[in-house]
Structures are given as C-alpha cells and as structure tokens.
Amino acid sequence: MLVIGLMSGTSVDGIDATLVDISGTTHDLQVQLIHGITVPYPAALRQQILDVCGGAALSIAALAELDDAIATQFAQAAIAVQQDHPPATLIGSHGQTVFHRPRQGASDRGGLQARQPLKLGYSLQLGRGELIAHQTGIQTVSNFRAADIAVGGEGAPLVPKIDAYLLGHAAKSCCVQNLGGIGNVAYLPARHGDRWEASVLGWDTGPGNSLLDLAVVQFSEGTQTYDHNGSWAATGQPYLPLVEHWLQQPFFQQPPPKSTGRELFGADYLHQCLQDCQTHSITQPADILATLTDLTAAAIAHSYRTFLPQLPDQVFLCGGGSQNPYLHQRIQHHLPELPVLTTTQVGLDANFKEAIAFAVLAYWRHHHIPGNLPSVTGARQAVLLGEVNGG
C-alpha cells in the first residue's frame, strides 16, 4: 500500500513528506521509502508559527486562517512528493504542533501522589486533515495525539512502536534517539518473548535543536536559522559546570512517562541560559553554542543512565540533529562505552524517519491496529490513533 507521511516538528524547518510502500502489520512490518522531500514553509508563515509557539496571542478567526494555511502547505507537499511516482491511497499527517501541555498529576502511580486527580494533557496540531483530504483527494488520517491523551497518556512520543518493529533486534538492545526541536528516545530491548512490546520504553529527553536554533538566530541577527553541521559551536568550548547546573532543572529529574515542547524549552528558557552564561563570564557566541549543544547531549546521557533498566548495546540517531557532526560527537563523548550511529546506517533514512512513522500510523489506523504504547505514553490502554477524513 502506498502511503504518504507528512511531518513538521518543533524546529518548524518545513514539512517532511514521504511516499512509502508499506506491507505487513507489526511483526512482519515492511516499509520502502519511494521518495522523500522537505518543503520549507514560506518565511512569513514560519515566523507566524514560531510566534504562536512562543505564546503570541491571536483571535479564533486568525487561528482558523493559520490552521488552513498550514493545511494547504501540507497538501501541496503531499502532491509534490507524488510527482513522477504512482499515486498514494492514504495520507498520514502529524500536522504542526503549536502547543503541548503534558498531563499533570499522577493518579496511575503509587505513593501519596496517587490521591491526586489526573489532569489530562492537551496537544494542538494545526493543519486540519479534512482540508488536506479535500485538496489532495486522498483519505487523510490526522490528529494522532488526541486518542492517547483521552485515555490518560502524554500523547507523545508516538514513534517508539514503529521504531520497535522496524529497528528492534533479536539479540541486541538499542536506543533510537530523535533529534528534532525536542529530543526523544525509544528504548528497544532485545526482541524476544511474549511481553517484548510492553517492555519498550520512550520519553522526551529535553531540548534537541530548539535552544540552538533560537540562539543562532539571535547571534546572527536573523541571517541564520540553525548552526549548519554544528560548525559554529565546534569552534567554541563547552562550559561543563553550567551544563551540570542546568541538568538539575525539574524536567530532567522527572521520571517517565514525560513529554515537553517549546513551552518549556523555548525563548524564555534560552533567555535564562544566556543570563547564566553571562554570570559565568561565557560571552563568546561559539562558547555559548557549544555549551547549549552539550546540554542536549548531556541530557540524553543523563536520561539513559537515570531511567533505563540498563544501557543499550547501541544508539541510533535520527532527525535533523543527526546531521550535526558536533552534536553527534558530544553525544558520543557522554556515552563513550556505546557505538553511536544513525538510523541511515541500519537502513532507515534518518532525515525522513519521523514522516515515515506517520505514514505507518495512518496505515495501522486503516487496518484497525492500535498505534500507541502505554509503556511509553502512560496511557491506560492501547488505542487506535488518528481521525479519518475523506473517502
């Protein structure tokens, strides 16, 4: 079955679109990437999205216009990725996250917290599926997070189940570390036993590229939107005592399940980081970028060492940050005992893996296969993910 996957993450770089040939279901799942493209947002639309993610107010009418503008961009990306290829029969669209509030309370855990009511999470992705379906003429599955949130889950991360069936190994455990605007991990134990799926873990590890991108925009006075290949940060020196101080922030100490976004690791957080750098006489942009890069890397290693039952046999990086050699180097520095590779090196394109995953989630929805993992999101049960729009 040919399925299109559409994804734009918290970096708001643009829309990743993939045309994927999918067969099987779970244990026999097979995917072949036919074509993948990244379609940048128009500059004004990207800035509007970033403003909204940063807390800018807008009217309901303006929100509707933004929703439609994003959906139109997603539809155009879906049309473009099919050019000169057989047409798809289904689209899975993650949409553009503009707000994410993790669940609050802990009614499903023991101890004194168990008496507190659980406040459901809330997550808003713009780019409505019904408009994408209308403009493309292809049935579209969207709004994937809502069903998991409704049964008490975080609504994120949703990719670990796909990682489990595409990258799980019979003899070796691994961590699949996504490096988008926010970092998230899927821990895949060696793939054997009846309870294997239930032992898959995953959570958000903290900032991926979000703080780095914001800092680069500020330091370059808007002439750059990211640190290409980490080359700017690589000329600096990270100040490790400050990184250790930042890791005491409550999010890093909070046990999984957990998720986060720009609501925490955004402009306000960067402002505090820059103030801390000033206090420690770290004033050169390259040194600040190196220290922020190290925060991403150290947070990943801290998360593994603190919350995993044991360190994995290997680590696979994916997402935009996997193309940053300096960030890769710093992750390897903090995990010296492990081989740190990319998913591309094991046959799954690191640039398009997230978009491929939402093609698979749409495919599973079409075949009535639950897409979430309660062991990852904290949901009470496995559920079908996504709303189906169009014929």
Image (spheres, grey):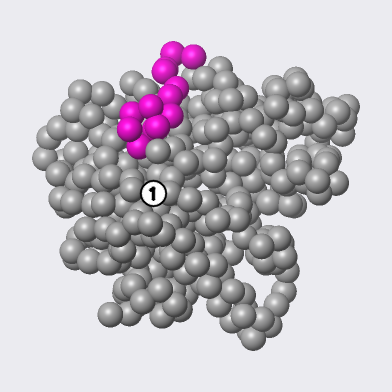
Under circle 1, the secondary element is strand
Residue 63 in the image: above or below residue 226: below
The outermost residue toward the left is: 194
Residue neighbourhood size for the residue with mark 1, other residues' Cα within 10 Å, grouped as few (<14), some (14–19), many (≥20): some
Residue 193 in the image: above or below residue 357: above
Q: Compare residues 133 and 382 and report the one nearer the observer.
A: 133
In magenta, the rendered stretch is 336-348
Quadrant, the N terminus: bottom left
The amino acid at mark 1 is His
Residue 281 in the image: above or below residue 71: above
Residue 377 placement (x, y as % from top left): 37, 53
Question: Dot 1 corresponds to which residue?
Answer: 35
Quadrant, the C terminus: bottom left
Residue 316 placement (x, y as % from top left): 41, 30
Count of marks, rendered view = 1
Q: Residue at coordinates 55% horizontally, 33% vertically from top-left?
A: 323
The outermost residue toward the top is: 337
Q: Residue at coordinates 19% horizontally, 38% vertically from top-left?
A: 196
